[in-house]
């Protein structure tokens, strides 16, 4: 995960960068708004920490700009103590959360975890079941990191099971997932696809519950 910290207070920034790197994040630090702009225009970011009191550019204008350029990226703002109007203006301008200086680094890390989790849920395109991962956007299925060929129908069944890991699906419910492809579904179609999926992705992936249906088996 890559973070951009825009903060002009060098000693505070230094401490934050150390704490963030120790927590496993990749961090770019910008000491001015202009420098921060260069970083976020250059690319790949997962989260921005923005001090509203910058020497060159008004933090709120930068925040609005960030919001337009990087719509889905969480922004955590840093504000001076007791500046309630700053916090409100910041949240109104699109910040996802704020921290009031001085703050404890542990709190900073906790806020970042919450924001990245929330953002991850919004952008979830990958389902992970044990050593199998399913990319919903690209329809790619991997086993231990290696791409496996699955048919559209196999994918439809796998996706249905993976969307609700604790639920048992009857054969009829899974057949319904296949009807959307517009072809005839014969009585043993689901069993054939489940058989193929097990062969490709591991026999424990899908369990048969006798007389009831199928459920995702997990990684055991
Ligand atoms: Ca400042």
Image (cartoon, rainbow, N blue to C red):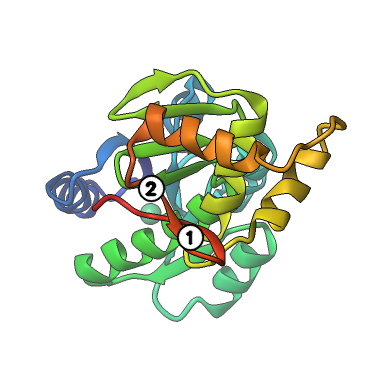
Instruction: Say above or below: 139 vs 171.
Output: above
Whole-percent x, y for residue 160 in the image: 62, 50
Please report the residue visible at 67 percent of the width from the left and 47 percent of the height from the top.
Answer: 64
Would residue 101 be found to the left or right of residue 186 on screen?
A: left
Whole-percent x, y for residue 172 in the image: 72, 56
Kindly check if marks 1 and 2 are in contact, taking CB atoms under 8 A apart as contact: yes
Of pointers 1 and 2, the one earlier in the residue sequence: 2
Label 1 CB less than 8 angstroms from ligand 1? no
Q: Residue furthest right?
A: 182
- Front position in the image: 86 or 44: 44
Ligand 1 sits in which quadrant?
bottom left
- Is residue 173 visible in the rendered image? The answer is yes
Local SS, label 1: loop
Whole-percent x, y for residue 167 in the image: 54, 67
Q: Quadrant of the N terminus?
A: top left
Please report the residue visible at 16 percent of the width from the left and 53 percent of the height from the top.
Answer: 19
Would residue 193 be found to the left or right of residue 116 on screen?
A: right
Label 2 CB less than 8 angstroms from ligand 1? no
Q: Quadrant of residue 148?
A: top left
Q: Name the residue tied to disc 1.
A: 165
Instruction: Say above or below: 94 vs 206.
Output: below
Mark sitting on residue 129: 2
Please report the residue visible at 21 percent of the width from the left and 49 percent of the height from the top.
Answer: 20
Please report the residue visible at 37 percent of the width from the left and 66 percent of the height from the top.
Answer: 111
Would residue 26 be found to the left or right of residue 179 on screen?
A: left
Local SS, label 2: strand
- Front position in the image: 136 or 204: 204
Whole-percent x, y for residue 31 in the image: 34, 38
Q: Residues under labels 1 and 2: Cα distance? A: 9 Å
- Is residue 32 visible in the rendered image? The answer is no
Mark 1 packing: few (<14 Cα in 10 Å), some, or many (20+)?
some
Count of numbered tags: 2
């Amino acid at each position: 995960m890559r973070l951009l910290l825009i903060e002009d207070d060098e000693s505070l920034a230094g401490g934050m960068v150390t704490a963030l790197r120790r927590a496993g994040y990749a961090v770019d630090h910008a000491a001015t708004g202009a420098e921060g702009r260069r970083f976020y225009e250059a690319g790949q970011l997962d989260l921005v920490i923005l001090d509203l009191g910058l020497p060159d550019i008004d933090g709120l204008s930068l925040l609005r700009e960030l919001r337009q350029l990087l719509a889905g990226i969480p922004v955590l703002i840093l504000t001076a103590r007791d500046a309630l109007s700053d916090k409100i203006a910041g949240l109104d301008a699109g910040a996802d959360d704020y921290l009031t200086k001085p703050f404890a680094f542990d709190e900073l890390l906790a806020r970042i975890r919450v924001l990245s989790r929330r953002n991850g849920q919004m952008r979830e395109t990958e389902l992970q079941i044990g050593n199998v991962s399913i990319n919903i956007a690209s329809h790619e299925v991997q086993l231990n990191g290696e791409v496996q060929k699955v048919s559209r129908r196999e994918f439809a069944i796998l996706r249905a099971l993976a969307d609700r890991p604790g639920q048992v699906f009857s054969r009829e419910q899974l057949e319904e997932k296949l009807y959307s492809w517009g072809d005839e579904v014969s009585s043993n179609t689901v069993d054939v696809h489940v058989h193929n999926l097990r062969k490709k992705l591991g026999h424990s992936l899908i369990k048969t519950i006798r007389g009831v249906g199928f459920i995702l088996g997990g990684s055991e």
